[in-house]
């Protein structure tokens, strides 16, 4: 991954002028490169990493494994897209191994998620089984630690 | 025993030794809650995992005996290869390399092996805090050569020549430099070598930050004609491999000097920590790539922080080595001490007064960028607010 993408992945709020200084190029070059990444679909969007539990202690995140019967024409794609359409769904991934698709969902309580799984996901014809795993605690998200910040053991001043 | 006044009974040189200027400021910063620091002289990276794993494995196997006094021979062989690759100079791993407890021990040993009472020792300043006290402890006379921001804190041949007397025994050359971030280019070193050739002056070249050189490759004085024979080259693992707590460095010099340095090490240390030595062997064999990763990260921060200070109106020459910037704070009308004290009290940002590294550091502060980008940005923001407040205060008078 190039240096610009790496910096943006770590912190998308760095300004173009900061990025330009850090990468030793002009602001225009940064702006052009970012638009190129956007138009080529390499950068899909910019988001915040939010500690859901800090916003709402009752919020629940779940990972749901789905076993799916692939469709004759579209394989898994059509079903995955259908699932991705739901607003509650944060990510959808096709997997190798014991199940086919993994879906992550965040809701305001366990009941909400249970209902979503039974009424929406399990109701899809091609879905043959579901297994729902409720998240107990998040430690790291998109490369960013989201539990208590690590303390700097180096002390304040040293020669 | 007269316990009223120990100082009269103890070694005079030790009693007279001043505590490090950093210590005082450390005590102030320590008392204030929620300080964000730019004051640390060590990497914020963790030691590469492979290195830690190598250490764990040797512990599990119980490889915890003393090593040879000079250090594990396989480590000395790796150091020899490393020096050949980086500074293109051959050192015999059997007779010319010593593994020390950090670069600091190697500095102490080299000074003790070279300096006799009354000898003058030229110390490039601003620089790391330990040189002058060790020289004084030996009864030597530390003499500062003050470098200037106009010369980008490089030592010039003219400055060196001017300070040489018939008592000059040793030059201490600390580049890449802590605290300024200055480096010596090949052409600068050539001129220094011209001055030294034809004299019997020794050199201690403290190259602990050599791997953190951002413009071109690090060049050592030992590469210059006539310099290897008089130089003790010092380097280590602390800064390059983020291994400060492992306490491991090394010295390389001609065997005729090394045999005396080795005696001092034998009697004071015996041998450097065994676990650390195995770890360092792995570092040199397998982790040179990690240095490049850390260096490219430092380099981005270096540009960000240099630019940040210049934009704030604190003029900052572009440092090309180590992980410090050394902005000039004279425009504020404050001394270095005042600036640092007021900054830490009013904005809770700790930077180190330039004077901690020599008198000629007055008018400057040392800022470490061994911190995350978000930490650096927050600190710069607060320094900006501090400068605004100073301006308003002065405007109000």
Image (cartoon, coloured by chain):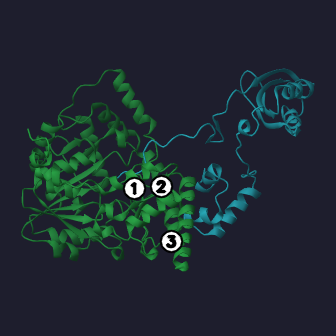
Image location (x, y in percent) of residue A68: 84, 24
Q: Which mark is residue B390?
A: none
Q: Nearer the viewer, mark 2 or mark 3?
A: 3
The chain whose colour is cyan is A
B286 up-or-down from B24: above or below: above
Q: Nearer the viewer, mark 1 or mark 3?
A: 3
Callout 1: few (<14), some (14-19), or many (20+) C-alpha neighbours within 10 Å?
many
Q: Is residue B214 visible?
A: no
Circle 2 sits in a helix, a strand or a loop, which is it?
helix
Chain B color in figure: green
Callout 2: few (<14), some (14-19), or many (20+) C-alpha neighbours within 10 Å?
many
Residue A35 in the figure: left or right of residue B319: right
A145 up-or-down from A95: above or below: below
Image location (x, y in percent) of residue B256: 9, 49
Give the residue number, with chain letter if any, for mark 3: B310
Residue drawn at x 53%, y 70% as measured from the top left: B387
Residue drawn at x 8%, y 61% as measured from the top left: B119
Image location (x, y in percent) of residue B277: 29, 35
Q: Quadrant of residue B21?
A: bottom left
Indicate the chain on which mark 2 is placed: B
Q: Is residue B206 visible?
A: yes
Asked if disc 1 and disc 2 are in contact, CB closer than 8 Å, the reply is yes
Q: N-terminal of the two: label 1 or label 2?
A: 1
Residue drawn at x 22%, y 59% as measured from the top left: B222
Q: Nearer the viewer, residue A8 or B13?
A: B13
Give the residue number, with chain letter if any, for mark 1: B212
Indicate the chain on which mark 3 is placed: B
Q: Are marks 2 and 3 on the same chain?
A: yes
Give the residue number, with chain letter if any, for mark 2: B298
């Amino acid at each position: 991954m190039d240096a610009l993408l790496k910096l943006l992945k770590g912190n998308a709020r760095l300004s173009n002028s900061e990025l330009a200084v850090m990468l030793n190029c002009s602001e225009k070059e940064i702006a052009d490169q970012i638009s190129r990444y956007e138009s080529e679909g390499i950068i899909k969007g910019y988001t915040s990493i939010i500690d859901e539990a800090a916003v709402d202690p009752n919020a629940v995140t779940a990972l749901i494994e789905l076993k799916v019967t692939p469709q004759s024409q579209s394989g898994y794609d059509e079903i995955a897209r259908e699932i991705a359409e739901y607003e509650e769904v944060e990510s959808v991934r096709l997997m190798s191994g014991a199940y086919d698709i993994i879906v992550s969902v965040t809701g305001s309580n366990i009941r909400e998620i249970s209902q979503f799984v039974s009424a929406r996901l399990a109701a899809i014809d091609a879905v043959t089984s579901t297994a729902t795993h409720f998240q107990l605690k998040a430690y790291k998200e998109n490369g960013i630690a989201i539990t208590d910040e690590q303390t700097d053991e180096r002390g304040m001043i040293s020669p | 025993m007269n316990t009223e006044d120990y100082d009269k009974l103890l070694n005079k040189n030790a009693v007279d030794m001043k505590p490090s200027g950093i210590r005082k400021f450390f005590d102030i910063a320590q008392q204030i809650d929620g300080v964000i620091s730019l004051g640390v002289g060590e990497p914020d990276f963790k030691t590469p995992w492979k290195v830690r794993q190598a250490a764990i494995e040797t512990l599990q196997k119980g490889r915890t005996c003393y090593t040879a006094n000079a250090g594990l021979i396989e480590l000395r062989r790796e150091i020899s290869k490393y020096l050949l690759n980086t500074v293109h100079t051959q050192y015999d791993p059997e007779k010319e390399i010593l593994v020390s407890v950090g670069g600091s021990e190697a500095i102490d040993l080299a000074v003790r092996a070279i300096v006799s009472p009354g000898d003058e020792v030229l110390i490039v300043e601003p620089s790391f805090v330990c040189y002058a006290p060790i020289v004084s402890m030996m009864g030597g006379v530390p003499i500062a050569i003050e470098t200037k921001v106009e010369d980008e804190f490089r030592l010039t041949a003219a400055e060196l020549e001017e300070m040489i007397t018939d008592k000059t025994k040793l030059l201490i050359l600390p580049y890449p430099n802590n605290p300024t971030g200055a480096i010596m280019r090949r052409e600068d070193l050539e001129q220094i070598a011209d001055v030294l050739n034809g004299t019997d002056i020794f050199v201690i070249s403290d190259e602990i930050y050599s791997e953190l050189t951002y413009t071109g490759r690090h060049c050592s004085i030992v590469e210059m004609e006539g310099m290897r024979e008089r130089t003790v080259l010092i380097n280590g693992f602390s800064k390059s491999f983020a291994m400060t707590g492992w306490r491991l460095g090394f010295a390389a010099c001609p065997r005729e000097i090394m045999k005396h340095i080795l005696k001092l090490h034998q009697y004071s240390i015996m041998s450097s920590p065994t676990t650390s030595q195995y770890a360092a062997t792995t570092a040199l064999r397998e982790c040179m790539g990690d240095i490049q990763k850390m260096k490219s990260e430092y380099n981005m921060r270096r540009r960000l922080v240099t630019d940040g200070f210049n934009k704030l109106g604190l003029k900052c020459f572009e440092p090309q080595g180590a992980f410090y910037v050394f902005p000039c704070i004279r425009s504020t009308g404050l001394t270095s001490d005042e600036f640092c004290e007021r900054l830490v009290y009013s904005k809770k940002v700790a930077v180190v007064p330039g004077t901690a590294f020599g008198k000629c550091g007055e008018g400057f502060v040392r800022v470490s960028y061994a911190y995350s980008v978000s930490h650096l940005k927050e600190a710069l923001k607060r320094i900006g607010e501090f400068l605004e407040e100073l301006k308003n205060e002065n405007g109000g008078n």
